[in-house]
Structures are given as structure tokens and as C-alpha cells.
């Protein structure tokens, strides 16, 4: 398999357009964070980071606390992650806050999560504005409670003129549902226009909830499970996956920086071979051509 042209093109564009962060923007750092920062190349940070925030329940259980306490503590970690990524000029951060499968949880836990989300959007708005963050929501939002939908609309509206990092909260999100929604949207368009043209990858990408964003370069999953759990199935095709045993409420800034250091050690080949191994030989074919 050979590298895809779209990725090569993206990487070149990336080098030209990208803003490089000043590590000083993080403010005071711990000795561990300072050490990790010395290992980081600020010009090669991931453009889009996606996170499966897992382990809130286990964190609470280990402390003999109700699960709700784990979720509440998880919102603090979300805050640190959001602010750190924004200050490091990451282009997009996507947090998996509620999946289509999460409706299987007890009603009291779901009600608590919805309440927590509403509280979160209100409380964190100053931090979001201060950091010039634009908000987006990924998922079947029309199935969420009306009050939550209203808060989501307001958050999108209030931040729509910001020019910094795009923060996507995946809420009532499922990767398969997203692909079905995209396929149905294209189908409806085809029927309306009487078109019979075959689908292209670009068309599908443009109909996903993440349309216009770069695909995630790094997928982080806390609490050790080796699963992708129906998250961004299309978009993570070439993402580097970082799984840590750390439970989400304990995933602090040092752990986030550590995931970036690990990301920069990976060699991304997009299906090609190591740089230099092909000598002067040209690719036999480029995908999509
Ligand atoms: C998984 O923990 C986490 C979730 C179901 C998502 C909820 C996330 C938060 C409340 C933190 C961030 C919130 C916002 C609004 C950005 P789990 O309950 O599955 O943990 P377990 O596997 O240990 O039971």
C-alpha cells in the first residue's frame, strides 16, 4: 500500500499555515511538565486530538464515592485538557462526552450527566472565551433533552466568532450513526438531483459531523481499555493511538504532555514505507488517482 495524496498534501499545507505555540503560554509548570516540554517539538504537535475520557466510575469506586463524584472530577480534567490544548495552539480537540450507547446507563446517571453538561457549559464559558475557543457538537443532538439542546445552541452561537482552537464535544455520538447520517444525506441529495454518480471519500468526509476539520492525528484513551468504542470510526483511519492506564480524573497536564511526546516518537507512514527505504523510486500509484 502506498501513501495517499490527500495526506501528503495536508502535511505540506500544515507546515506552511500552522501557528507554533510558545511553551511559556502554559504559565507555571511543575518540574515533571518542564522536563516533558524539553522533549516536545512545538512545530510537530498533533493538529487534532481526540479523547475517550474513560474511568470516571472506577476512579470513584476506588474512593468509595458515588459514580457522580467521578464524573464531576472528570470535568476538572476536561477543563485542564481544553486549556492546555488551546494554549499549545492545537487546532481541534474532540472529547467523547456521551455516546449513543450511554443511554443504557441508569436514568439517574444519565440525568446527572445531562445536568453536569449544562452546568459545565455555563461555568466554563469564561475560560472558553478567554482562550478564543470555538465550540461544536458532534452527534444526534436532536435526540437530547430540549434544555440541553438550547444550551448547546447558545454555546455555539456565543463562540462562533472566536478564531482559536475548535472544541468538539461528542454528545449522543456514535461513529456508525454518523456514517449512516452522512450516507443518508448524500442519498437524499442524489435523489433530489437525480444523480447516480458513485460516492467519493471527499463527499463522505464533507457530510460527517466533523466536516472541515482535519482528521485526528492522535487518539487518547484513558483507563487502559484497548477499544475505539464507536468513536470517529472514519476519521481515525490514520490516527496514532495512545492508551494509558491512568483513569480520566487523574489524567493531568503531565499525562497529556506525555501523550504528545509519545505521539512524536511514532513514525507515520500512511501505508507507505520508511522515508529513504525506496531510494529514488517513485510511488507505483497514489490512492485516489
Ligand atoms: C466515562 O467514564 C466517561 C463518560 C461517560 C463521559 C462523561 C465525561 C465527563 C463527565 C467528563 C467531561 C465532561 C464534559 C462535560 C466535558 P465511565 O463512567 O465509563 O467510567 P468507568 O468505565 O470506570 O465506569
Image: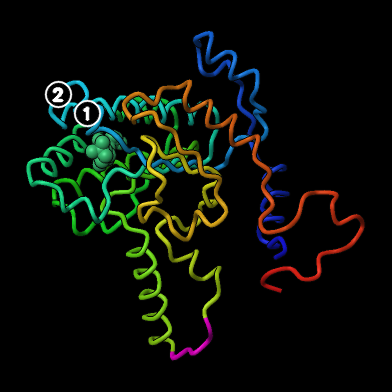
Q: Secondary structure at mark 2?
A: loop
Residue occupying image coordinates x 92% and y 57%: 280
Colour style of the rendered protein structure: rainbow
Count residues near mark 1 (Cα–Cα under 10 Å), then give few for <14, some for 14-19, many for 20+.
many
Q: Report the front residue among 162 and 65.
A: 65
Asked if the residue at tag 1 contacts the one at tag 2, i.e. Cβ–Cβ closer than 8 Å, the answer is yes
Considering every residue shown, the one lying at the far right of the view is 280
Count residues near mark 2 (Cα–Cα under 10 Å), then give few for <14, some for 14-19, many for 20+.
few
Q: Secondary structure at mark 1?
A: helix
The x and y percentages for residue 211 are: 47, 58
Residue occupying image coordinates x 20% and y 26%: 60
Give the spatial CA distance, label 2 vs label 1: 8 Å
Q: Main secondary structure of the magenta part?
A: loop
Q: Report the front residue among 228 and 110.
A: 228
Instruction: Classify mark 1 as within 8 Å of ligand 1 or not, answering yes or no.
Output: yes
Is 3 situated left or right of 146 in this image?
right
Circle on res. 65: 2
Circle on res. 70: 1
Over which residues does the magenta segment extend? 194-198
Amino acid at each position: 500500500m502506498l501513501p495517499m495524496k490527500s495526506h501528503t498534501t495536508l502535511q505540506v499545507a500544515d507546515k506552511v499555515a500552522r501557528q507554533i505555540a510558545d511553551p511559556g503560554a502554559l504559565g507555571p509548570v511543575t518540574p515533571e511538565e518542564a522536563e516533558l516540554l524539553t522533549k516536545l517539538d512545538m512545530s510537530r504537535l498533533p493538529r487534532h486530538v481526540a479523547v475517550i475520557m474513560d474511568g470516571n466510575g472506577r476512579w470513584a469506586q476506588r474512593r468509595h464515592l458515588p459514580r457522580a463524584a467521578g464524573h464531576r472530577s472528570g470535568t476538572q480534567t476536561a477543563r485542564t485538557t481544553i486549556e492546555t490544548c488551546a494554549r499549545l495552539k492545537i487546532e481541534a480537540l474532540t472529547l467523547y462526552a456521551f455516546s449513543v450507547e450511554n443511554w443504557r446507563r441508569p436514568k439517574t446517571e444519565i440525568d446527572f450527566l445531562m445536568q453536569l453538561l449544562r452546568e459545565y457549559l455555563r461555568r466554563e464559558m469564561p475560560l472558553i472565551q478567554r482562550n478564543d475557543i470555538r465550540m461544536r457538537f458532534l452527534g444526534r443532538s436532536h435526540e437530547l433533552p430540549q434544555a440541553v439542546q438550547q444550551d448547546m445552541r447558545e454555546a455555539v452561537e456565543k463562540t462562533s466568532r472566536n478564531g482559536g482552537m475548535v472544541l468538539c464535544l461528542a454528545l449522543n455520538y456514535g461513529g456508525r450513526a454518523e456514517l449512516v447520517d452522512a450516507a443518508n444525506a448524500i442519498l437524499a441529495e442524489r435523489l433530489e438531483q437525480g444523480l447516480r454518480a458513485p460516492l467519493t471519500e471527499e463527499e463522505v468526509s464533507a457530510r460527517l459531523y466533523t466536516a472541515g476539520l482535519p482528521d485526528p492525528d492522535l487518539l487518547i484513551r484513558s483507563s487502559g481499555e484497548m477499544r475505539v468504542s464507536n468513536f470517529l470510526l472514519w476519521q481515525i483511519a490514520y490516527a496514532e493511538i495512545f492508551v494509558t492506564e491512568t483513569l480520566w480524573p487523574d489524567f493531568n497536564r503531565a499525562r497529556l504532555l506525555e501523550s504528545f511526546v509519545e505521539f512524536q516518537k511514532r513514525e507515520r507512514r500512511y501505508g507507505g514505507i520508511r522515508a529513504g527505504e525506496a531510494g529514488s523510486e517513485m510511488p507505483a500509484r497514489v490512492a485516489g488517482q
